[in-house]
Image: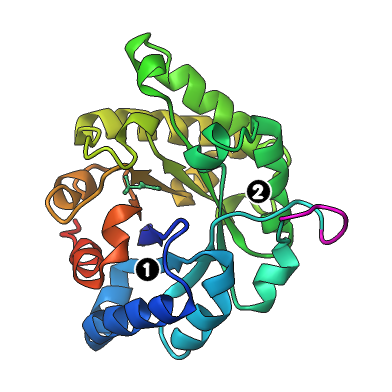
C-alpha cells in the first residue's frame, strides 16, 4: 500500500514566527489523531528557507515531515542566492520540491537543471518531489502527456535505480495552480496513469507501483475526496490551502480507500 502524502507548499509566505504559529495550530489539530492518521497517510510542510530552522524546532516530536522548496545541485560554491542539499538536511529536511512550475516559469529553470537538483537531493538521502505539469495552452493543443512525460524523463534522468523508489512525483497542471480551477479527478487520473506507466518503463513495475504521485492545483477540502478516490492519486501538493491550519488539516483528513 502506498501511504498518501499531503504536502503543504508555503511558497514565499510565513516568516519564522508565523511558521511556528501555523505548525503549533496544525499539531494541535492533527497530533491527537496521529496514530490513526499515520496508518495510511503522511503530512509534510515546506516553509521558505529562512523559516526552516524555526519550523524544525516547532516540529520536534511530531510525525509531520519537514520539506524545502528547492535545492542547488552543488554542495557549496559561488552560487549566489542558492541553498544546497546538505544545508537543508542539517536542519532535518527530508523532502525537497524541485521543478515547481513557479521555478520553471518565473525563474526559467529548465528540465535539465531540475534533474540535477533532483539528483542532488536524492544523493543526500532526501526525497525529491519532482513537479511536472502542462500550461493551459499546452493542454488546449493536446500536448499534455508529451509535456509531462518530457519533464519526467529529464527530471529523473540522473536518478539511479538505488534512489528511484524514494522519489515522489507531483502532477501540477500550471493552469490549476493558484487559480481556483482544479483538474477533474478523471483528467488527473489519466495523467497520473501515464506517469506511472513511464516510471515502469524506466525503473520497472515494482518501483513504479511504489512511487507516489501527488496531484496539485487548487486542492481544497471540498475537492480532495473525489481526487483521492482515483487509484493513481497518492496525495496532494497544496499551496494556498496549506497556509491555514484548519483548511490544511481538513485536507489531511481526506477520505481514503
Ligand atoms: C502549488 O503551489 O504547488 C499549488 C498547488 O498551489 P495551489 O494549491 O494554491 O493551487
Is the C-beta separation of discs 1 and 2 under 8 Å? no
Q: Residue at x 58, y 71 (%)?
A: 50
Residue 152 lies left or right of residue 90; in this view the side is left
Judging depth in this view, the residue of 247 and 235 nearest the camera is 247
Relative to residue 181, is residue 210 depicted above or below? below
**Quadrant position of the C terminus in the picture:** bottom left
The magenta region covers: 75-81
Which numbered disc, 1 or 2, marks the residue closer to the eye?
Answer: 2
Look at the image and say whether residue 77 sits in the magenta stretch. Answer: yes
Q: Main secondary structure of the magenta part?
A: loop
- The structure's colour scheme is rainbow
Residue 143, compared with residue 180, is above or below; it is: above
Quadrant in which residue 86 is drawn: bottom right
- Residue 227 rendering spot, x and y as whole percentages: 21, 44
Seen in the picture, residue 14 relative to 157 is either above or below; the reply is below
Q: Residue at x 25, y 33 (%)?
A: 183
Q: Position of residue 90 (x, y in %)?
A: 69, 77
Q: Is residue 35 magenta?
A: no
Question: Would you identify the image quadrant in which residue 188 lies?
Answer: top left
* Quadrant location of the N terminus in the rendered image: bottom left
Looking at the rendered structure, which numbered label has been put on residue 239? none
The residue most toward the bottom is 61
Label 1 element class: strand
Name the residue carrying label 2: 118
Give me the C-alpha separation between circle 1 and circle 2.
Answer: 21 Å
Return the residue at label 1.
Answer: 42
Between residue 219 and residue 170, name the one nearer to us. Answer: 219
Q: Which residue reaches farthest left?
A: 222
For this view, does 176 lie left or right of residue 159? left
First in residue order: circle 1 vs circle 2: 1
Residue 160 seen in render: no
Residue 236 in the image, given as x and y percentages of width and height: 33, 52
Amino acid at each position: 500500500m502506498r501511504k498518501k502524502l499531503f504536502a503543504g507548499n508555503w511558497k514565499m509566505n510565513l516568516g519564522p514566527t508565523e511558521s511556528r504559529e501555523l505548525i503549533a495550530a496544525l499539531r494541535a489539530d492533527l497530533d491527537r489523531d496521529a496514530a490513526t492518521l499515520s496508518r495510511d497517510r503522511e503530512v509534510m510542510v515546506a516553509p521558505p528557507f529562512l523559516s526552516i530552522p524555526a519550523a524544525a524546532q516547532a516540529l520536534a516530536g511530531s510525525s509531520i515531515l519537514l520539506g524545502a522548496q528547492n535545492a542547488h545541485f552543488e554542495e557549496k560554491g559561488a552560487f549566489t542566492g542558492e541553498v544546497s542539499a546538505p544545508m537543508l538536511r542539517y536542519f532535518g529536511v527530508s523532502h525537497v520540491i524541485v521543478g515547481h512550475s513557479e521555478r520553471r516559469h518565473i525563474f526559467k529553470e529548465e528540465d535539465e537543471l531540475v534533474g540535477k537538483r533532483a539528483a542532488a537531493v536524492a544523493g543526500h538521502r532526501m526525497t525529491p518531489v519532482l513537479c511536472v505539469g502542462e500550461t493551459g495552452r499546452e493542454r488546449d493543443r493536446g500536448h499534455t502527456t508529451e509535456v509531462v512525460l518530457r519533464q519526467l524523463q529529464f527530471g529523473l534522468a540522473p536518478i539511479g535505480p538505488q534512489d528511484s523508489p524514494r522519489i515522489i512525483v507531483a502532477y501540477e497542471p500550471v493552469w490549476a495552480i493558484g487559480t481556483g480551477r482544479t483538474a477533474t479527478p478523471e483528467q488527473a487520473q489519466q495523467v497520473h496513469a501515464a506517469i506511472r506507466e513511464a516510471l515502469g518503463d524506466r525503473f520497472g513495475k515494482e518501483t513504479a507501483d511504489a512511487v507516489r504521485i501527488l496531484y496539485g492545483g487548487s486542492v481544497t477540502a471540498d475537492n480532495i475526496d473525489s481526487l483521492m478516490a482515483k487509484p493513481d492519486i497518492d496525495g496532494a501538493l497544496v499551496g494556498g490551502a496549506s497556509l491555514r491550519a484548519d483548511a490544511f488539516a481538513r485536507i489531511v483528513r481526506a477520505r481514503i480507500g
